[in-house]
Image (cartoon, helix red, strand yellow):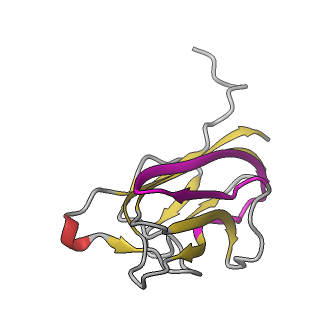
């Protein structure tokens, strides 16, 4: 089989798996979603310690972010997909939120990333009028190169 002109795939993934109720993670403004395992990857570097995926090739990527959020009455949370380390640079169109009781929220965006860019899911804001923070128990972040 001839593979001379075949482009190598570029993708990466991070996941936070379901945890018992007594270990559900609070959502704190200004933090990244905390991931616990890496999924499949090629030509990227998923990093659990940094809660980010670094791409090794420049190009247009499809980025998917999902968070399973547990909210109490009147609570809400806003997320962005950001380039690291500067949280002030969310990807265009990457803001998503959750409000209600228990919800899975997420977004799917396309963005041009440069080789060496790292992305993560940023907790941009929480609203908790009764003092107890909103929480989450699962999350996923995936990237796939569409074109370069």
Res 82 visible: yes
Query: On screen, 89 above or below 138?
Result: below
Query: On screen, 138 above or below 146?
Result: below
What residue lies at 61% left-to-right and 37% top-to-bottom? Answer: 9
The residue lying furthest to the top in this view is: 1
Q: Please tell me whether the stretch drawn in magenta is mainly helix, strand or loop.
A: strand
Query: On screen, 128 above or below 64?
Result: below
What residue lies at 70% left-to-right and 65% top-to-bottom? Answer: 116
Left or right: 142 in relation to 145: left
Look at the image and say whether residue 13 sits in the magenta stretch: no
Res 63 visible: no
The residue lying furthest to the bottom in this view is: 131
Q: What's drawn in magenta, residue-wise?
A: 93-122
Provide residue 143's location: percent of width, then percent of height.
Answer: 60, 48
Query: On screen, 45 above or below 112?
Result: below
Q: For the C terminus, give its image quadrant.
A: top right
Picture quarter containing residue 125? bottom right
Provide residue 146's location: percent of width, then percent of height.
Answer: 71, 37
Q: For the N terminus, give its image quadrant.
A: top right
Front in this rendered view, residue 101 or 147: 101
Picture quarter containing residue 102? bottom left
The mark tally for this picture is: 0
Left or right: 77 in relation to 94: left
Provide residue 106's location: percent of width, then percent of height.
Answer: 56, 49
What residue lies at 63% left-to-right and 36% top-to-bottom? Answer: 8
What residue lies at 49% left-to-right and 68% top-to-bottom? Answer: 74
Front in this rendered view, residue 82 or 5: 82
Provide residue 21's location: percent of width, then percent of height.
Answer: 21, 66
Front in this rendered view, residue 43 or 94: 94
């Amino acid at each position: 089989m001839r593979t001379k002109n075949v482009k190598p795939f570029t993708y990466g993934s991070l996941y936070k798996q379901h945890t018992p109720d007594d270990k559900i993670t609070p959502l704190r403004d200004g933090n990244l979603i905390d991931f616990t395992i890496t999924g499949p990857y090629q030509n990227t570097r998923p990093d659990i310690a940094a809660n980010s995926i670094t791409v090794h090739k420049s190009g247009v990527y499809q980025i998917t972010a999902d968070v399973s959020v547990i909210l109490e009455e009147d609570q809400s949370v806003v997320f962005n997909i950001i380039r690291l380390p500067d949280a002030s640079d969310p990807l265009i169109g990457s803001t998503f939120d959750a409000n209600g009781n228990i919800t899975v929220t997420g977004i799917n965006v396309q963005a041009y990333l440069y080789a060496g860019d790292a992305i993560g899911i940023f907790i941009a804001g929480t609203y908790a009028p009764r003092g107890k923070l909103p929480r989450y128990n699962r999350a996923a972040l995936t990237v796939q190169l569409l074109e370069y």
